[in-house]
Amino acid sequence: FILLAIPALAFLLMSNSGGISGARSGSPGDGGASCASCHTGGNFNASLQITSNIPQEGYDLDTDYTIVINTSSTSSTHGFQLTAENSSDTKIGTFTAGSGSRVINSGTAVTHSTPSSSGNWSMTWRSPSTDLGAVTFYSAVNAANANGSTSGDQTVLANTTFASLSISEAQKIDFAMYPNPATDILNIELPEI
């Protein structure tokens, strides 16, 4: 019996060194669930920052942006999960995995494919093709002690928000400018209200 129980117990205690599918980013759309539901008890002075090349003014529709996770900790083994949601807690946009990561949950989240010693990952997020409002990126990073179980690990959470640059059809103004090219005078013709 003991010989049969040892492999079963080892399987139950194994961490997800290749990342975990499901909702574990700590986002509202994930019900707040994160790696902290299993990985606890450690302290590696971990901190997490999410950065992007999305302009401060906001993201443009149907455009690729780079999302970067930077972790600082004394651990030599890290894992993560990242997702993007709007203010209604709905997943928006799609991800393309970068080195050391893989796409999960039908493209709406990314996780590590192998543990990282640096805790830094870069991936691509494609913004939605219609205006779904501001986007918030949520991430959970696990700084692990690499003992193969979930004990003695530290999970940290972070999020960052970017506005949408899109203009709704109702806000667009139809106008005409002439002559083109202009030298001294430029006429702008607006629609009648």
Image (spheres, rainbow, N blue to C red):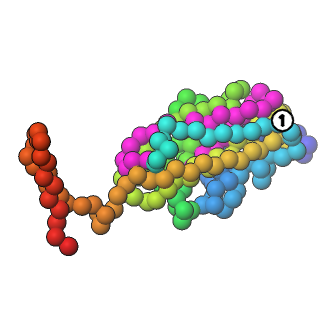
Question: Residue at position x 17%, y 62% from top?
Answer: 190
Image position, residue 131 (x, y; %): 39, 58
Question: Residue at position x 14%, y 59% from top?
Answer: 189
Q: Nearer the viewer, residue 126 or 6?
A: 126
SS of the residue under disc 1: loop
Image position, residue 191 (x, y; %): 16, 66
Q: Is residue 6 left or right of residue 134?
A: right
Query: Can the viewer see residue 125?
Result: no
Q: Main secondary structure of the magenta part?
A: strand
Give residue 115's quadrant in the image. top right
Highlighted range, magenta: 59-84
Query: Can the viewer see residue 144?
Result: yes
Q: Find out whether residue 151 is within the magenta segment.
A: no
Residue that extends furthest to the left in the rendered view of this protein: 179
Indicate whether 101 appears above or below 106. above
Tell me the residue that label 1 is attached to. 44
Indicate whether 153 appears above or below 76. below
* Count of numbered badges drawn on the protein: 1
Q: Nearer the viewer, residue 168 or 4?
A: 168
Residue that extends furthest to the front in the rendered view of this protein: 184
Q: Find out whether residue 71 is within the magenta segment.
A: yes
Question: Residue at position x 70%, y 34% from top?
Answer: 71
Question: Residue at position x 70%, y 39% from top?
Answer: 48
Image position, residue 13 (x, y; %): 81, 43
Q: Quadrant of the C terminus?
A: bottom left
Give residue 119's quadrant in the image. top right
- Amino acid type at circle 1 is Phe
Q: Is residue 131 left or right of residue 3?
A: left
Give residue 188's quadrant in the image. bottom left
Q: Quadrant of the N terminus?
A: top right
Image position, residue 54 (x, y; %): 48, 41
Q: Nearer the viewer, residue 139 or 58?
A: 58
